[in-house]
Amino acid sequence: MTSPLDSYTASMGDLHFSDEAKARMTEGLRAAADAKSAEKNARSEAPAEVLTMPARPPKRRTRRWARVAAGLALALALGGGGTVAVAAGVLPNPADVLSDVFGGAPAQTELLNEVGRPIGASATSNGVTVTAEAVAGDRFNYAVAYSIEFEDPAALEGIEFHEGGTLTYVGDAFLRVDGAMSGGGLVRLYDADPGDNTLQLVQVMGIHTWNDAGIVGRTARFSMSKLEIFTDEGEFKTLAAGDWNLKFEMNYVDTTVDLPASQTTTWQGSDVTIDSVAVSSLGVTVDYTINRQTRDLALPGEVSEEALAEQAAVTGLPVVVTFADGTTFDATDANGSSAKHSDGTTTVSKATTYDRIVAAGDVVSVTVGDVEIPVNTA
């Protein structure tokens, strides 16, 4: 089995450049170093307030940021300041390395109220501008909010919105993070202000990384070639087509809260030990060990009802999240994995994002089986 380092070394070994290309690359790197040095010198001479609060964008952009932040509902209240740890040992894709050399570095992301705000992460095509407005997340999930501004307001005329100004999104907006694999999520398209010519797009995604490393400090790369919706009449409608590509730093304050564990319960007659529980403004993760194992299942088309019931007796332990407003989220059928052990037990891991984004302090408890575990964010 090859490691990420093996694949990376092999990929880099196959790259060849002409003398002219090498000269351009060297000049580009030298210019970037000179610019960085000049920026550092300028910052050292700036007043303290400039160092702690970057210049605000034009007033219209500020209002749009406020709407996007409100739409995310991320009144993150965990505290902890604005320091961010950059993930170490991340091996970038060789193509991404070249993109960053010749196409410019990713947009920097500043922290405002513990939510990241990409600076200048924007792309325009065919009269439509897509801008990354906000990013938030935890160890296992992230949420990114974009604004989609139409130069021609007529493009949005005649669109029938659902309750709450939402649309049924079926476009191809895609975001990948260097060194991470997506594990499922949701996309929401809506109109925060019917009086303007801008739509909002929010992507919430679970991720997997090598060695469970976080993604803060890594580069996110967004691409989209069309914005399409599904109408109430059962038809696909293209709102915009073009080529939108942008990149920015994944910079946010991790909202993960680790809850007390090691409680015991039972599930369908088997003893269960709760190994770990973590919640955030975006999702919940639960690991437990159950004193039961299943047989290896057959091919999907050959799985019997008996085999499915046997599987549910291991992985079906109920998990329910309760919020401050009294509503709940059932995470029982969350994406998961399991591992058998020689002592006859099975370790199960469940992780999923909610069907909404909440303030981290609004998660009241997580019930695993019949054990209710309160969340204390103080």
Image (cartoon, grey):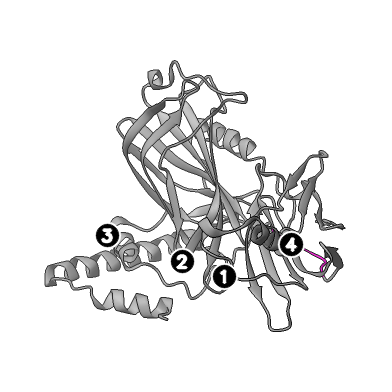
Using a 10 Å C-alpha cutoff, classify the residue at mark 4 as few (fewer than 14 neighbours), some (14 to 19) or many (20 or more): some
Does the stretch in magenta take in 260? yes
The residue tagged 2 is: 179
The residue drawn where x is 70% and y is 63% is 310
Which label lies toward us, 1 or 3?
1
Horizontal side of residue 180 vs 163, given as left or right: left
- The amino acid pointed to by label 4 is Ala
Quadrant position of residue 183: bottom right
105 in magenta? no
Q: Does residue 188 show up?
A: yes
Give the amino acid type for the residue marked by disc 1 in the picture: Ala
Element type where label 4 sits in the image: helix
In the image, farthest residue toward the bottom: 342
3D distance between C-alphas at marks 1 and 2: 9 Å
| Comparing labels 3 and 4, the label whose residue is closer to the camera | 4
Mark found first going from the N terminus, 1 or 4: 1
Instruction: Looking at this view, name the residue that lies furthest to the top.
Output: 158
Residue holding disc 4: 313
What secondary structure is marked by label 1? loop
The amino acid type found where label 2 is placed reads Gly
- Give the residue at x 65% y 58%: 308
- Which labelled disc corresponds to residue 102? 3
Distance between the Cα atoms at labels 3 and 2? 21 Å
